[in-house]
């Protein structure tokens, strides 16, 4: 059974094309590769499905962008085929090669933006997030195949105009969880 990746998310309503954090949101010079699921900092992030951890790494770092905190990502190849990327994690509770079960804790929600380092020159969607106080979230991506290393991919965004073939819009995938699940959103 698939489970919602952040049981304590504020809502299970996914961002739409008019709101920040939607899939393939046009951010001026880049496109958003996942959907953002907003939740309080330190909320548990669980594996949606049974699968195997195939990669873990640094997702954002203040060494790369001054207004970022250091966060991590986990890639899990589901036993049903798709690969889920769980990103903007504060910490990681699994290791590469580990078999995970649906519902298993894999990390915790972090806050990517270091608000003190956001300046007038920062991208407008970053300043918008800050204004809306939408700072802690899970960045969730869905892939058909192992994502190829590319200079066009950085921090969950794609800097080319052509969407990579392996990247899937995760909305239907996530909606299927809500439809099939009796999980309750605890903070709604
Ligand atoms: Zn995101």
Image (cartoon, grey):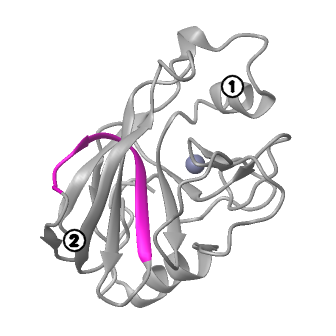
The residue located at (45%, 57%) in the rendering is 188
Task: Tell me the CA gap for discs 2 and 1.
Answer: 33 Å
Q: Secondary structure at mark 2?
A: loop
Q: Quadrant of residue 115?
A: top right
Q: Viewer-proximal residue, 188 or 48?
A: 48
Residue 20 in picture, x, y percent from top left: 71, 47
Q: Which residues are magenta?
A: 83-95
Q: Which residue is mark 1?
A: 131
Residue 58 in picture, x, y percent from top left: 37, 38
In the rendered structure, the answer to whether residue 30 lies left or right of residue 74 reads right
Can residue 98 be seen here? The reply is yes
Q: Secondary structure at mark 1?
A: helix
Q: How many marks?
A: 2
Can residue 11 be seen here? The reply is no
For marks 2 and 1 on the same chain, the one whose residue lies earlier in the sequence: 2
Q: Which residue is mark 2?
A: 103
Determine the main secondary structure of the stretch shown in magenta. Answer: strand
The residue located at (83%, 40%) in the rendering is 29
Residue 30 in picture, x, y percent from top left: 77, 45
């Amino acid at each position: 059974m698939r489970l919602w990746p952040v049981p304590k998310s504020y809502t299970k309503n996914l961002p739409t094309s008019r709101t920040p954090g939607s899939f393939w949101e046009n951010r001026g010079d880049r496109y958003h590769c996942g959907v953002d699921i907003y939740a309080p900092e330190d909320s548990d992030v669980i594996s949606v499905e049974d699968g195997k951890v195939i990669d873990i790494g640094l997702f954002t770092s203040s060494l790369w962008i001054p207004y970022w905190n250091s966060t991590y990502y986990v890639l899990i190849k589901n036993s049903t085929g798709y690969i889920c990327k769980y990103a903007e994690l504060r910490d990681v509770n699994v290791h590469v090669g580990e078999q995970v079960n649906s519902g298993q804790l894999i990390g915790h929600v972090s806050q990517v933006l270091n608000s003190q380092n956001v300046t007038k020159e920062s991208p407008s969607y970053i300043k918008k997030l800050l204004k809306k106080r939408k700072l802690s979230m899970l960045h969730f991506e869905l892939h058909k195949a192992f994502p190829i290393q590319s200079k066009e991919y950085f921090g969950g965004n794609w800097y080319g105009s052509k969407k990579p073939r392996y990247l899937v819009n995760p909305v239907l995938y996530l909606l299927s969880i809500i439809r099939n699940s009796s999980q309750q959103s605890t903070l709604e």
